[in-house]
Image: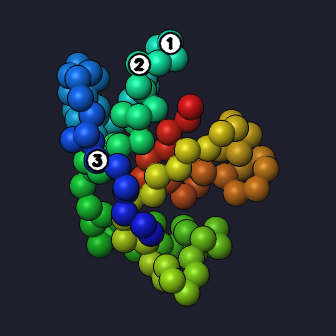
Amino acid sequence: MPESETDFAEVIGQQHVKRAIEVAVAGSHNILLLGPPGPRKSTIAKRIPSIRPALTLREVIETTKVHSICGLLNEEYRFVSTRPFRTPRLLLHILGGEGRGCVSYLAAGSSFIN
């Protein structure tokens, strides 16, 4: 899968938010960013994949299996080598009620819901 095109180091300011995200990523914890429109929650969240560690061999195999079952592999991508990152727009889509659900193939990845 393509590498992240955004880098967490590009975020200027927001030190308390950046530190919370770094701690959450380091411990493989969930994080919820709440607040009014404008303080750059989306900009920061989209850069989280750039600070996640590389997949272990076991995670590569597990993630590739799930992607294969979901029909997400093709001739160009025969295995998953980076952590999945999705930005679903609808809760229904996340739960799999319409099309492919995101939760099933994000076991080793990240999801950002705006």
For numbered disc 3, what is the local secondary structure? loop
The image's mark for residue 7 is 3
Q: Going 47% across and 72% down the picture, which residue do you hit?
A: 64
Asked if residue 89 is positioned above or below residue 31 in the image, the reply reads below
Gap between marks 3 and 2, in whole Å?
18 Å
Which quarter of the figure has residue 92?
Answer: top right
Labelled pair 3, 2 in contact (Cβ < 8 Å): no
Quarter containing the N terminus: bottom left
Residue farthest to the top? 36
Count residues near mark 3 (Cα–Cα under 10 Å), then give few for <14, some for 14-19, many for 20+: some
The kind of residue on which mark 2 rests is: Pro
Which residue is the site of mark 1? 36
The kind of residue on which mark 3 rests is: Asp
Labelled pair 2, 1 in contact (Cβ < 8 Å): yes
For numbered disc 1, what is the local secondary structure? loop
Count residues near mark 2 (Cα–Cα under 10 Å), then give few for <14, some for 14-19, many for 20+: few
Count residues near mark 1 (Cα–Cα under 10 Å), then give few for <14, some for 14-19, many for 20+: few
Which residue is the site of mark 2? 39
Q: Going 25% across and 40% down the picture, which residue do you hit?
A: 10
Relative to residue 44, is residue 1 drawn left or right?
A: right
Report if residue 34 is visible in the image.
no
